[in-house]
Image (cartoon, coloured by chain):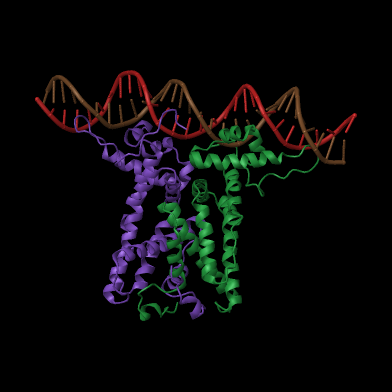
Chain colours: A green, B purple, C brown, D red
Amino acid sequence: MAPTTRQPVSPGPAAPPRGKGRPRSATADRAILDATRAALAELGWGGLTMGHVATRAGVAKTTLYRRWPSKNELVVDAVASLFDDLEIADLGSLRADIESVVAQFADLLSRPETQAALLALFAEGSRDPLLRRRIRERIVDPQKHLVQQGRALAQERGELSLDQDEATACEEIDIIFDTIAGAVEHRMLVIGEPATPQWIHRFTTLLLSPLPGLTAAAAEPPPAE
Amino acid sequence: MAPTTRQPVSPGPAAPPRGKGRPRSATADRAILDATRAALAELGWGGLTMGHVATRAGVAKTTLYRRWPSKNELVVDAVASLFDDLEIADLGSLRADIESVVAQFADLLSRPETQAALLALFAEGSRDPLLRRRIRERIVDPQKHLVQQGRALAQERGELSLDQDEATACEEIDIIFDTIAGAVEHRMLVIGEPATPQWIHRFTTLLLSPLPGLTAAAAEPPPAE
DNA sequence: AGAGATACGCTACGACCTGTAGCGAAAGAG
DNA sequence: CTCTTTCGCTACAGGTCGTAGCGTATCTCT
């Protein structure tokens, strides 16, 4: 793809300047990220070119490469910021909190540029372990933190018993998070249908109670491992 | 990317010949698809080039373009067949059936070429409604059928009460399927960690019973819509 | 068997993208 | 006011996509 070797993934959103001469233009930073998101929505990952983004941002192509070592990194940063304002609302009940955060997530994933960008990132991440790690740090982990918060809130309210074992609690959070995030992602990104309030409501019900119509006998015994 | 306009997604695996002169080589067909899968596993979507596939298949590049209009179509066909042998095992309990099908799915998704291909397809599908429809028909719908089968089996066994309403049952199957497929996809494709038997076991437990430690009061009341 | 039709491999090609290099000019920091 | 760094510009090498044109191979049909 490139005639030269690939640089390691940059640690931050952009290479850190060192405060001596002319500082980097923050305006250009924003213009580039905005242009990236816009181009992503229009053209998708495959259609997005660095030249295009540069032109659209009113910036020279070389300026892009001064900040991000390649397309991947640029797109991660352009997209990750979208996830920054997910938050737990503390609506007074576990159920309401779940519905709220799922709705926020669904809202985010309903935007075409988020869809294109996320899937493209995931796809690239399947080949590039460093990129995948970066996705986890910038996107997945913050979301998982929401599950922890929600869980803690529910415990304060007495809806949920306190954790006995730290490790077990961690694993449980992982699974719950996989389930919540995965269901929404699957519906919106793979199937391509919106997560309506009804869908969210029913999904939350599924998460909080056993399968409707399930015999007690079938639900009860989780056979020993 | 290309100097010419893109053709619409081809209706079949390859353009249909018309039986007059020399027929297309079926050997070449298979060699190309095999080479595509192999290259996908090694290089991923981004690294896969038509020239590479051609060389590997022992075929001229032009031969590829005589059959598939572009990379997308070639990869869809190369990958879709992988999903053909998922099936419900009828192990005697709903729980065992779920674990079995999740394990099959996880096994499939653990193969690198499936990961790369699937994610790349999903990504392209987010921009191309026709491609997305094709993914649904060839990949998603057959999987959803498994959920229907498992549900029917559980009802026969008396583990699950019979459906009262056809439409409601349909919606419920959708949600359950979104949840199962989504969780596995999220864990393996996004996070990039394997779905161990332990994980599958715990996930199934989560699906079949309420959240561990949940107060009865918090679990019970699904507020009216 | 012969004629016709089609697929095949090969080479070359135009258009495009990536990421780098080198330059003079501009703009802040100290 | 000087020094450092960024900026925009142009040019470039390496690489991919998908097409065109050619002579040859291979199959079908008469």
Image quadrant where residue A24 sits: top right
Instruction: Spot the residue most to the front.
Output: B225
Determine whether C11 is above or below B70 in the image: above
Pinpoint residue A131: horizontal percent, then vertical percent: 57, 50
Residue A3 % position (x, y): 57, 34
Q: Note whether C21 is above or below B141 in the view shown.
A: above
Q: Position of residue A53 (x, y in %)?
A: 58, 36
Q: How many marks?
A: 0
Q: Is D1 situated left or right of A194 in this image?
A: right
Residue found at x 32% / y 33%: B66
The front one of B6 and C6 is: B6
Quick one: A203 or D1, which is closer to the camera? Answer: A203
Instruction: Look at 28% across and 40% down and name the residue there.
Output: B27
- Identify the residue shown where x is 34% and y is 37%: B68
Q: Nearer the viewer, residue B26 or A196?
A: A196
Q: Position of residue A150 (x, y in %)?
A: 58, 68
Q: Is residue A7 above or below residue A130?
A: above
Q: Quadrant of the C terminus of chain B?
A: bottom left
Which image quadrant for residue B157? bottom left
In the image, is A217 to the left or to the right of A68?
A: left
The residue located at (30%, 41%) in the rendering is B11
Which is nearer the eye, B134 or B45?
B134
Give residue B2's quadrant in the image: top left
* Residue B82 visible at all: no
